Amino acid sequence: MYELRPYQQEAVDNTLNFFRKKRSPAVIVLPTGAGKSLVIAELAKIAKGRVLVLAHVKELVEQNHLKYESYDLQAGIYSAGLNQKDSKRKVIFGSIQSVANASDSFFNDFTLLVIDECHRVGLEPDSQYAKVIKRLKLNNKRICILGLTATPYRMGLGWIYNIAHQGEMKTQELRFFKHCIYELPLEYMIKNKYLTPPVKVDIPVTSYDFSELIEGGKSYTMAQLEEVLKQQRRLTPLIIKNIVDITDSYKRQGVMIFSSTVKHAQEVMESLPKGQAQLILGETEATERDRIINAFKERAFKYLVNVSVLTTGFDAAHVDVIAILRPTESISLYQQIIGRGLRLDTGKKDCLVLDYTGMGHNIYAPEIGDKKTAPESVPVEVPCPECGFVNDFWGIVDDDGYVVEHFGRKCRGAIQKPETYEFNPCGYRFRFKICDQCSAENDITARECCRCGYTLIDPDTKLKQAKLSLNAHVLTPDSIEMLERSDKNGNPYLQVKYYDYDARYVSEMHYLNNQTSLKKFNINFLRSHTRKPELNLSIRSVGEIIKIQPQLRMPSFVIARKQGKFWKITEKIFAEEL
Ligand SMILES: [Zn+2]
Ligand SMILES: [Zn+2]
């Protein structure tokens, strides 16, 4: 039999607790190597009714089934590709394609559906998953649906669920899975020595430039990829020499090279030491593939080159160098590739990651959701002043690691009642746009007011109009100067001058000498200029504001309009609005 690791037990307990209270589809996130098959086994064992475990490829069906039976448990397989169609046993491991074509009687008596690699399940009503789920529900409308994945996000979609297990709102858009009920970070697996640490090496001599292929998250064709590589052909021998040098000088045992196209893989092979490298392509025959993989596992050769065939389900524990020579447009693909090198093995201390794509994903901090706003941005933690939830945002840190600015807009924290999974988002806005009509706070990108429906003019349009108007001037500030001045009655005021590159400037003035003027100053200046808007800065004089000038930021554009003889600043547009 088997024994669950503590975190596997926790995942099982959370699943039971959740389905006792709710029947919406839920997700468990376990990194590769966390032993998800044990979690499946335990759940299948406890389940009162029948259990269907679905995967999208026959290799995964077979692998999950094998693991299951290795615990002295019995289960059937339903997969045309594996030549087995067992529909009688309590637990069935099936491939989605075969199950989608099964007859009605197949779907009887299931109480639990487990979907492996569940980030592939979307909301498309005519997908195979949707059809299978519909038929299962016809037989049992209270069936529990549990998804498992190591990478709970998908390109172009972002997070695949709404609510994280720690009570964080990941997205408000409609998702198939509502709750994530358990999540184990990769760091945990590494810290507790269940996996080998990946070490990203920053020395690659040169990198390919794939940026034109993946700009703005668009997809590309093999022909486009081939074309981009053709222009950069001369880089391949340099890159391969670098891989070989590193492998030799760090005495590495097994190197996996992920190349872009078949042609590219052949070029890679030409530069690798003869007799030390083998190539696996999509078209490589199964027996030949097995022979190569076995020889690699026995360390008969060092370099295993492949074109997107070994990204999932392949494991050779001794792999201690991963070289990425193909665009990794999605973070899940990147994580899967690196996952190939993280298995434990005797004498293995770490796995070197050589990334020649110039794309630089971070394996620990997936860049999901918000786009990076500035090139120097790094992930930072920002506590919410309302609910205390620590948000992960993009931000800028100083040399001491202190957060000087962040680009978060809305708190993702929430209060979730453990008894009912009832969910109340905090909703605090760090940055917002105030409606001219009703003063409601709106998201920066909102097109109309969330309270009164009034159309909010988008900053791009504002800019375009101002640039065309003779009575408006658009200035791109390059520096900002803050001065203490006095009017003719001797009252002090703050003058703010925005200079452009050619030292032309526009300026504005703010009084800070009574409660009303302070309030105005807060709304019209401080709120949008502070780098960390959640800090409630209490400013009482011109001197005080000048003193904290480093904590203030510049707008991207300042629009001034002619009023009589003078130019008056009427709008300021900040980076996050564009
Ligand atoms: Zn909050
Ligand atoms: Zn409004």
Image (spheres, rainbow, N blue to C red):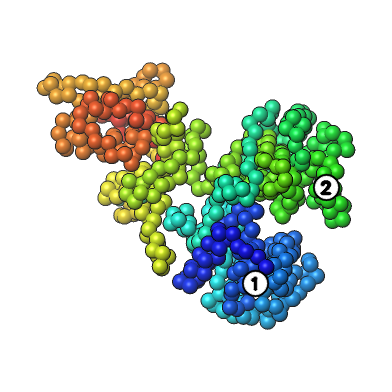
Q: Position of residue 150 (x, y in %)?
A: 60, 54
Res. 298 mark: 2
Q: Amino acid at mark 1?
A: Leu
Name the residue: 56% across, 69% down.
145
User: In which quadrant is the N terminus drawn?
Assistant: bottom right
Residue 101 visible, this orientation: no
Q: Secondary structure at mark 2?
A: loop
User: Crowding near pointer 2: few (<14 within 10 Å), some, many (20+)?
Assistant: few
Under mark 2, the amino acid is: Glu
Which of these two is toward me, 454 or 546?
A: 546
Instruction: Give me the C-alpha separation between circle 1 and circle 2.
Output: 36 Å
* Numbered disc total: 2
Q: Looking at the picture, does residue 24 appear above or below residue 171? A: below
Name the side, left or right, on which 499 lies relative to 366.
left
Residue that numbered label 1 is attached to: 52
Dot 1 or dot 2: first in sequence order is 1
Residue under the image location 16 percent in, 37 percent down? 515
Place of residue 69 in the rendered image (x, y in percent of width and height, measured from the top left): 72, 68
Q: Secondary structure at mark 1?
A: strand
Disc number at residue 556? none
Q: In the rendered view, would you say 128 is above or below 517? A: below
Who's the residue at 65% across and 72% down the image? 52
Q: Residues within 10 Å of mark 1 (few under 14, many from 20)?
A: many
Q: Is residue 332 left or right of residue 396?
A: right
Q: Decide if residue 25 is in sight here.
A: yes
- Judged from this view, the residue extending furthest toward the left is 489
In this rendering, is residue 42 above or below 444?
below
Q: In which quadrant of the rendered image does the C terminus lie? A: top left
Q: Is residue 37 left or right of residue 452?
A: right
Front: mark 1 or 2: 2
